[in-house]
Image (cartoon, rainbow, N blue to C red):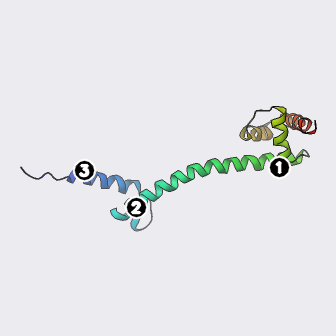
Amino acid sequence: MTRARKGAATRKARKRILKAVKGHRGAPGHLYHLAKEGAVKAAVDARIDRKRRKRDFRGLWIIRLSAACRQRGIRYGQFINGCKKAGIGLNRKMLSEIAIADPKGFDSIVEAAKAACTS
């Protein structure tokens, strides 16, 4: 029986890796062995950054809320504590959107949080 070689499958696999690293600078974008390592590193970094994006957006919302709260004479921590005590179930993303789009609505939320904090 003749020996079966995997020429087409190997070529296809290599082309897939090289296509994945298209745009990488230098040898990792052209040489298969280095491209394979570059593809793995890129996948690892992509996963890490998907997690980091969530962290970054939460930080952005907190910064926006903190600035909006300071304008209304309350600290961010007091505001969040007051929201929890008042039973306001909005998350930081929604609160920051309200602070930007509807300042009067945010004023009423701040007043409710202040009242819940003092009582």
Residue 30 image point, x, y percent = 36, 63
- SS for dot 1: helix
**What residue is rendered at 80% in x and 32% in y?**
88
Q: Earlier in the sequence, mark 2 or mark 3?
A: 3
- Residue type beneath disc 2: Glu
Residue identifier under label 2: 37
Crowding at dot 2, Cα within 10 Å, few <14 / some 14-19 / many 20+, comes out as some
- Mark 2 vs mark 3, foreground winner is 2
Residue drawn 42% across the image and 61% down it: 38
Q: Nearer the viewer, residue 23 or 57?
A: 57
Marks 2,3: beta carbons within 8 A: no
Q: Position of residue 82 (x, y in %)?
A: 85, 39
Query: 69 or 113: which is nearer to us?
Result: 113
Q: Quadrant of the C terminus?
A: top right
Q: Separation of disc 2 and disc 3 at Cα? A: 20 Å
Q: Amino acid at mark 3?
A: Ala
Query: Which element type, helix, strand or loop, lies under badge 2?
Result: helix
Mark 3–mark 1 CB contact (< 8 Å): no
- In the displayed orientation, state which residue is furthest to the bottom: 26
Position of 6 with respect to 116 (left or right) is left
Residue 94 in view (yes/no): yes
- Whether residue 76 sits left or right of residue 14 in the image: it is right
Circle 3 residue: 9
Amino acid on which disc 1 is placed: Ala
Check disc 1 and report the residue beneath it: 67
10 Å crowding of disc 1: few (<14), some (14-19), many (20+): some
